[in-house]
Image: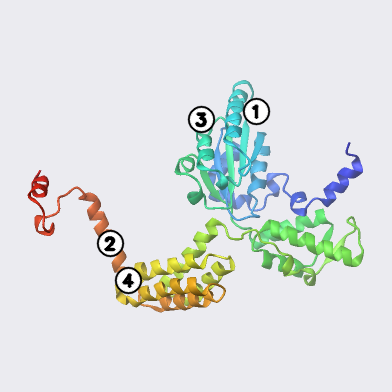
Amino acid sequence: MTGLFETKYDALRSPLAQRARPQRLADFFGLERLLKKNPALRLALDGTRSFQIVFYGPPGVGKTSLARLIGRQRDDDIVEFSATTASVKDIKELHQKSKNISTHHVTTTLCFVDEVHRFSKTQQDALLAPLEEGVFSFIGATTENPYVSLTPALLSRVRCIELTPLSDDELRGLLNRAANFERVEMSESFVDEVIKLCGGDARAALGALEEAASLRREQDSLSLTEIVRLEGSDMNADVVVLGGGQSKSSHYELTSALIKSMRASDLDSAFYYLARLLLNKEDPRFIARRLAIFASEDIGVINNQALAVANATYSLIEKVGMPEGRYILAHCVMYLSSSVKSTQVKDMLGDALERASKTRTDAVPKHLRGTITDIEDRYHRI
């Protein structure tokens, strides 16, 4: 049996990110910005009808917190699944249970699936019928781009809403509120350091605050219940753990940024995004393949040497390996960025494909067929 003092101890010992979770919608930083941009979200909050939403965005922007607050606002029966453990059977059982509840009770059900991008196609297909029928409301959360990670059938039944990193002012407000839970006083310099390092990641900011407070308490021999003062010097960049990492979405976004920077002959930006890909441990062969495609698609015959350079880059990457291979990639990026550009190959092939798609059953003119037999000639005339 858990006693009063054990409960208090556990509350103090639980992570700050958990203790500082907003308990009401008014405490959710960035809500007004979201509502203004996504009217469908307001309907989910204010209405009584079922809804289907997928929240996507980087870690630490409040996807799970907002989902729970919506369920609490609507007084729904919240059923949470993790995509890593939920099965098709679980979804089917919830479907049937929700049908029974909606028939005999006023209470509605909200199904929340965290990491929904990890659902297989079969699991996603299991959601189609209940979402089509509207027997329960649905919120999925993902750090990936849903337009890449979810099936077209599921995407057609949900509204995708992007949650972006918190602004500096929002992060400042979050830290000031969390300071009460952690029993700390923060100087402006400390708050500024956290904001600068955490890039809008609320979980990382709260973790940095908790770590700094813990270290300061240890140094000053203070208990958990005593107030501690934090200065800018207490902020250690090494303790900041950002949740972004290398997701599929950042993989595509960084690659796109690299290509667009080279296309614009912006060498500084191209090198920056190449560095981001390298820091994220991207496969250098993938980068080399993208450079080869760029050499043909964006430079083409106006500089045939570009394709030869890209081909040599791929070959050398396999022979040299990393980390030295990064210089070879940088060499290629510099060459391609500086080269004159032409999309003639891409444009002419696109036109040819469009014409071919409309005339794909037309016979090849006789003078272009080459040597054919009489049987083949009669076949073409038919």
* Residue 159 horizontal side relative to residue 336, left or right: right
| Disc 4 + disc 2, Cβ < 8 Å | no
Which amino acid is tagged 4? Gly
Task: Give me the C-alpha separation between circle 2 and circle 1.
Answer: 58 Å
311 w.r.t. 349: above or below: below
Name the residue that disc number 3 marks.
133
* Residue 287 horizontal side relative to residue 27, left or right: left
Query: Which element is circle 2 on?
Result: helix
Query: Which element is circle 3 on?
Result: helix
Task: Give me the C-alpha separation between circle 4 and circle 3.
Answer: 51 Å
Name the residue that disc number 4 marks.
300
> Nearer the N terminus, badge 2 or badge 1?
1
Closer to viewer: mark 3 or mark 2? 2
Which amino acid is tagged 3? Glu
Q: Quadrant of residue 307?
A: bottom left
Task: Give me the C-alpha separation between circle 1 and circle 4.
Answer: 62 Å
Neighbours of disc 1 within 10 Å: few (<14), some (14-19), many (20+): some
**Which quadrant is home to the C terminus?**
top left
Task: Give me the C-alpha separation between circle 3 and circle 1.
Answer: 17 Å
Name the residue that disc number 1 marks.
107
> Nearer the N terminus, badge 3 or badge 2?
3
> Nearer the N terminus, badge 1 or badge 4?
1
Residue at image position (26%, 63%) is: 348
Query: What's the mark number on residue 349?
Result: 2
Q: Quadrant of residue 75?
A: top right
Closer to viewer: mark 3 or mark 1? 3
